[in-house]
Image: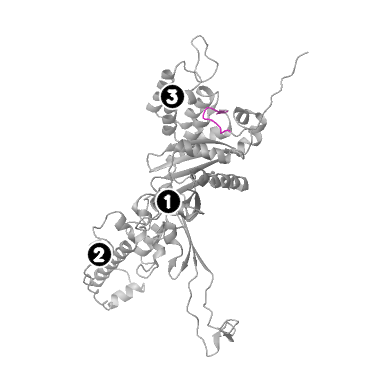
């Protein structure tokens, strides 16, 4: 009598390792490979075939005595032979689908490792900087219960201990210790060449089981594997900031499950960075953007993190002096000449009663028209000078530092309408009292006003409106120039509340 073998699966708290493989024909794998460009995918394949990644990202190779299986693509017998195949693909034109099919159906038909999938996602992030939505957080040191455990601040008032020590292996071990009892995760830590930061990719599975059982079991693939979430966490160099992005395709919502899994990981991040007697917590910074370079510019290690808007000229070194240096006031520009009275012919032309005079195949320009064109050029130059003074080096189109959305709530007091000796005229012609219920001082009038600016680059759009004369650049508030460095804020007394605390000033 044959004994039926049973397999016992025991929950574990260990993390998923790099060598664990996903089925090559799984929809998640095919979709991830299809998002990367053809040159980027070929470059990744050559990285997988290097000696450094041979043990984790090794391909399927034929033995010397083994025959070629039936199929469109022929399997290679060595790494050098397979590398030559992909180098030949690099040297000629083709489509991305050809490379994806060869990877899935021939060279890695035994499965794609988790490290390979992580490298594909990071390459997609590098090629599409606007493909994810980033949230800015700030690491803040918690106050100790005993005062002697907290070091004294520096003479300038800056807490030099705000920057935690970051050791990659220790951080990943502590992070796995915090989230291990709740879910399974795979960690991939790397550096980006284009930006000064360390990027952590976390692949989250809402399951107590790990290893190949989680990745290859048919029931698990149908129910749980399609629901796993990918979380990106970026740590910029030399600043207590964290950038977080829950990777989802555009047009799709995160869902309650994805937000709950992200909350678990975010709650464990400051605990993993903390050490005995030095505890940290995360605070929001009211900044959300789709460009990682914009996050680095506004919350990064550079001088521009606290010098946005018109103050950016001092951070970029465009001027040699400081904003505190006294300068001799420049002589005011001479006012433009008064406008001349238009001639009768000009009035008739403006009213459409006559056609412009044509002489020698050209439209004849009168002296008044020439003067008006010169006046328009002078005002255009004036508006550009004002925009340059208010925005500085910020708000330049296609600079990769744009905010896609700016939400502002105004809470400033506004002047009241015409009042009588008793109170305010209401809409029905009656009189409404201005005093409060207790008969004290008049209550300020604060209407509920919310402003939302949306576009590919909000600050650049506002700067363009100033240059075209739609907005008065001399009277516009400072928060419209982006100097607060936030995407959501409350304006009181003409300034965004809490902006100095967010920027660490």
Numbered tag placed on residue 325 in the rendering: 2
Question: Closer to the camera, 133 or 270?
Answer: 270
In terms of sequence position, does the residue under pointer 2 or pointer 3 come before the other?
A: 3
In terms of sequence position, does the residue under pointer 1 or pointer 2 come before the other?
A: 1
Magenta extent: 14-22
Q: Residue at x 33, y 75 (%)?
A: 348
Q: Residue at x 54, y 32 (%)?
A: 30
Is the C-beta separation of discs 2 and 3 under 8 Å? no
State the residue position of label 3: 49
Residue 430 in the image: state x and y as whole percent. 59, 87
State the residue position of label 1: 162
Name, please, the residue furthest toward the bottom: 421
Residue 378 in the image: state x and y as whole percent. 26, 67
**Image height of 4 relative to 463, above or below:** above
- Closest to the camera, between mark 3 and mark 1, is 1
Secondary structure that dominates the magenta span: loop
What is the secondary structure assignment of the residue under circle 3?
loop
Magenta highlight on residue 382: no
Cα–Cα gap, marks 2 and 3 = 59 Å
Question: Closer to the camera, 378 or 354?
Answer: 378
Q: Residue at x 54, y 19 (%)?
A: 71
């Amino acid at each position: 009598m044959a004994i039926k073998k049973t397999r016992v699966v025991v929950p574990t708290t260990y993390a998923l390792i790099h060598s664990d493989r996903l089925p090559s024909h799984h929809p998640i794998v095919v979709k991830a490979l299809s998002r990367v460009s053809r040159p980027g995918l070929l470059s990744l394949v050559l990285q997988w075939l290097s000696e450094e990644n041979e043990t984790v990202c090794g391909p399927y190779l034929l033995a010397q005595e083994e025959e070629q299986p039936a199929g469109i693509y022929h399997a290679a017998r060595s790494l050098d032979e397979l590398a030559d195949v992909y180098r030949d693909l690099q040297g000629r034109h083709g489509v991305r689908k050809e490379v994806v099919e060869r990877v899935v159906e021939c060279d890695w038909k035994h499965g794609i490792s988790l490290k390979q999938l992580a490298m594909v996602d990071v390459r997609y992030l590098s090629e599409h900087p606007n493909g994810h939505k980033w949230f800015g957080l700030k690491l803040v040191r918690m106050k100790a219960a005993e005062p002697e455990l907290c070091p004294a601040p520096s003479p300038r008032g800056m807490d030099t201990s705000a920057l935690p020590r970051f050791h990659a292996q220790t951080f990943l071990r502590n992070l796995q210790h915090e989230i291990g009892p709740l879910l399974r995760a795979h960690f991939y830590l790397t550096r980006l060449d284009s930006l000064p930061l360390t990027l952590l990719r976390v692949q989250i599975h809402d399951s107590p089981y790990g290893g190949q059982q989680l990745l290859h079991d048919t029931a698990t693939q149908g129910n749980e594997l399609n629901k796993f979430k990918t979380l990106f966490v970026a740590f910029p160099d030399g600043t207590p900031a964290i950038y977080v992005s829950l990777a989802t395709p555009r047009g799709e919502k995160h869902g309650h499950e994805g937000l709950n899994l992200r909350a678990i990981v975010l709650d464990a991040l400051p605990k993993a960075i903390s050490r005995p007697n030095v505890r940290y917590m995360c605070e929001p910074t009211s900044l959300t953007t789709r460009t990682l370079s914009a996050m680095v510019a506004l919350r990064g290690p550079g001088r521009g993190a606290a010098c946005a808007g018109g103050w950016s000229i001092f951070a970029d070194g465009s001027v040699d002096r400081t904003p505190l240096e006294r300068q001799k006031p420049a002589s005011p520009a001479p006012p433009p000449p008064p406008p001349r009275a238009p001639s009768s012919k000009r009035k008739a032309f403006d009213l459409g009663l006559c056609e412009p005079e044509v002489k020698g195949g050209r439209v004849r320009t009168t002296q008044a028209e020439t003067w008006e064109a010169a006046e328009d050029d002078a005002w255009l130059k004036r508006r550009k000078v004002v925009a340059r003074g208010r925005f500085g080096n910020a708000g330049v189109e296609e600079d990769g530092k744009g905010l896609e959305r700016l939400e502002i709530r105004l809470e400033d007091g506004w002047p009241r309408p015409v009042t009588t000796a008793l109170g305010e005229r209401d809409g029905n012609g009656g009189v409404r009292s201005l005093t409060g219920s207790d008969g004290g001082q008049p209550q300020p009038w604060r209407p509920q006003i919310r402003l939302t600016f949306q576009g590919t680059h909000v600050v650049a759009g506002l700067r363009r409106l100033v240059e075209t004369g739609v907005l008065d650049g001399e009277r516009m508030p400072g928060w419209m120039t982006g100097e607060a460095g936030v995407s959501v804020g409350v304006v009181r007394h003409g300034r965004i509340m809490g902006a100095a605390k967010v920027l660490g000033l």
